[in-house]
Amino acid sequence: MDETQHRVDEVRRERSKLENHLIDEYVLGKITRRELVRRGTVVGMSLPLLSFIAAACGGDDDDGAATGTGGTETTATGDVQPGGTIRVALIQPTTEPNPLLVQDEGGAGMLGATGEYLSFSDENLELQPRIAESWEPNEDGSAWTFTIRQGVTFHNGATLTANDVVETFEKLINPDGGSVNAQSALGGVLSPGNTEAPDDATVVFNLDAPNGNFPTLVSSANYNAIIIPADLDPADWGQTFEGTGPFKLQNFSPQVGATFVRNDAYWGEPANPETIDVKFYAEEGPMVVAFQGDEVDFVEHFSVAGGRALLEDPNTQVIAISTATHRQLHMRTDKEPFTDARVRQAIALSIDRAALVDGLWEGRAEIGNDSPFAPLYPSTDTTVAQREQDLDQARQLLADAGMEGFEVQLDTWDGFEIPDLAQLVKNYAQEIGVTVSLKITDAATYYGDGVFGKSTWLDSVMGITDYGHRPVPNVYLSSVYTSEGTWNAAHFKNPQADQLIAQYVAALDVDSQKAAAKQIQELLLEETPVILPYFYNFLSAAKPNLQNAISAATGQFDLSRAGFTA
Amino acid sequence: MGRFLLKRLGLAAITLFLLSVLVFFGAQVLPGNVARRILGPFADQAAVDALNEELGTDQPLLTQYWDWISGLLTGDLGESLALGVPVGELIGDALVNSFKLAALAFVLVVPLAILGGVVAALRRDRLTDRVITIGGLSLAVLPEFVTGIVLILVFGLWLEILPVSANAPPGSGFFTQIKYLLLPAFVLVILLFGYIARITRAGTIEALDADYTRTAVLKGLPRRTVIQRHVLRNSLLPTIAVVATQTGYLIGGLVVVETLFNYPGMGRLIVTASRQKDLPLLEAGVLVVGIVFLVAMLLADLMYSLLNPRIRYSRAE
């Protein structure tokens, strides 16, 4: 043990303050082995190193999966046949394939098909190195240094250098014509001109403020951030799909599909399948039918509502990933009938969340607690009491507030399971004497121009909005729950919340993040500007004999190790 | 004949122009704007404005329309705003696909429906007639998504003899493509059979009751000759008109069928374009369908004149 301790000390001397803090937390038992690995990969520690620390300092093996799910790139099961064509069903991209414009799942799937990110955020939110070999923060996490993998070539033969990485990010965060979507994650974090390449193998990001989650923000979780050649205009990307990934473009036809073939010059282990044949589907129904009719092998994403048949089909392998994707029911805190927090609490208490998860999602969702802190996030404080249905208390709260038997309109749009949810909310409200009238429009009408005063979403007294998955809750917090938040549909203005959120974002280690999270979670339960009934799983479907197909909740799929068993 | 054609072409040009104006300004009624559609509901307003400026969609409507129509007159259909590729390419592929499906549907349904209509007329008020007219009508009122799903379930998933998607893999031969198109074509056959058969039946009954038919029978012509030379020639006139009006629908209106069978045809292209307010694509798509429709009507009129010597256009102007 002395020998081990000696080696641990040696390792710790070389690590940054942030990394040592993480090790301390693990030694003290504040985080599990799994969280150590997850957080460790984010701050740039390698998996072998983390396994060593976990073994040397841990003792109790609370989570045997820690290293198993670490997912080094070569864990293909042995009996997969080499080569072959995998036929993929993907929801039709809504825009041209342009890394700056893509903002939908189908588009993200196209970017990830040939492109690679600095790292790949896997289903456990662990970062697997790709273009970046490793990364490391400075003392306080205000600057991050990424070591760029050498010997990586684009599909056109050009060698990737640190300059390509710098230029990629400068294009994304350019305030004039950059990527709106990438900026939703990097805005206020990384400013133009602050990314530099001291040499061909090093990129340094100098941040606006310390940020412990930065590596996640430049990983595949920020799906626009595929590394493209410095001299390529992103608007022309769709002509070649220029990337460094294990597959390269053979053919792309808008609204029809795309074909990708193995890139034999790939820097890592060459892909197993020879061809990936992607077909676009405008709607989910035909996608499910095509899968059942054996015309595709892999459905990148299906919903419980549209693909119920697949959930019960013995010929389907359902791949489920926990996400932070959710529906948010907002109540205008500045407008009658919701100015009194007790009224908002009453509505939240009327809802039977477990029934929603069963009925709408066949159990494939996690129950929400009216804050964006999904159970998935390491920083979520799971000891905060879960809100349960309590009709008596709800009626009492309405009586106390003198607001019995009011009527209110609920606005939302016709997509996914949202109309069903709206109907159920209406039914639950009925039980406590509140009459909800539904106004369900198309998405464009509901979202309008997306700014206050010109958007049903942001102006309605009560509404249901869909929020996509984010690898960290920062964007939800600052955009929805702060006084200045641009998506603050509840018009929730609470100085204490503003302060706690600022505190959370600045926190570098899980411990202090969790402390702030706990207070935010409790405050949001108390104030209830919004109801978040559930976080649902991201579901993919694969034929039973297709192995090692990986999806990400952001829309990309990794089939480089996939193949068919005999 | 020449004058007739010229007149028709002039009228067609005016119709298309009005159509383009209607679509252009009608599309403005749709909520949202192009850049907002492209960038999504969560995008910053400044970014939306910037993209609208780049796309030219911040200009006054008349300017936009002028830009578009002057491009069109010089043969430039422009680029799709959402997909960033030339509109011509998108329309070309989709149009070919739509023609394939429409052609197969016509080849199947027209002879079948005419035969059905004539047989029903000849056996008027008997069981065969009832089966054809009532059966055809019942099938025709079924929505396409119902017949489509039933056909998919039976032939695609249960019997597993036909593909459930309509788009054959690239490079497929003629017969493979037909195999892929059979199910959606069946849906259209079911949809159109009753209608066309009914019109044919009515036309045939009218012709059977006509004086010239009685004369032909009374002068001792064999039944077969009477039907071929006197009845059919007259009874098919309304059928041709009906078939021609269906062409526009088959080329541009098959949104449900194309979606159900994941077929990249004109219907889906136009609907997607209208959803995204992708005006160059929407305009070109609608105009192309309009042209197809007008050409079909023109051909129908010409066939009319061939079959019916009474309407010779040189005299009828």
Image (cartoon, rainbow, N blue to C red):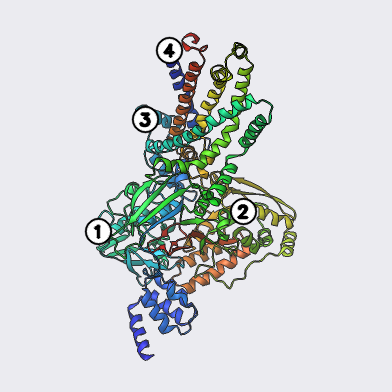
Up the image or down, A457 lies above or below A22; here it is above
Towards the viewer: B97 or A565? A565
How far apart are the two marked residues, 1 and 2, measured between alpha carbons? Answer: 53 Å
Q: Which residue is mark 2?
A: A332
Q: Which residue is mark 1?
A: A159
Amino acid type at image mark 2: Arg
Amino acid type at image mark 4: Arg
Towards the viewer: A541 or A400? A541
Which dot marks residue B195? none
In the image, taking residue A137 as reference, residue A401 lies left or right, namely: right
Chain assignment, label 1: A
Which dot marks residue B3? 4
**Which is more foreground, mark 1 or mark 2?**
1
> Disc 4 on helix, strand or loop?
helix
**Crowding near pointer 4: few (<14 within 10 Å), some, many (20+)?**
few
How far apart are the two marked residues, 2 and 3, measured between alpha carbons? Answer: 48 Å
Towards the viewer: A374 or B282? B282
Chain assignment, label 2: A
**Which is more foreground, mark 2 or mark 3?**
3
**N-term mark: 4 or 3:** 4
Q: Position of residue A234 (x, y in %)?
A: 34, 49
Chain assignment, label 4: B
**Which is more foreground, mark 4 or mark 3?**
4
> Disc 1 on helix, strand or loop?
loop
Q: Which residue is mark 3?
A: B71
Are callouts 2 and 4 both on one chain?
A: no
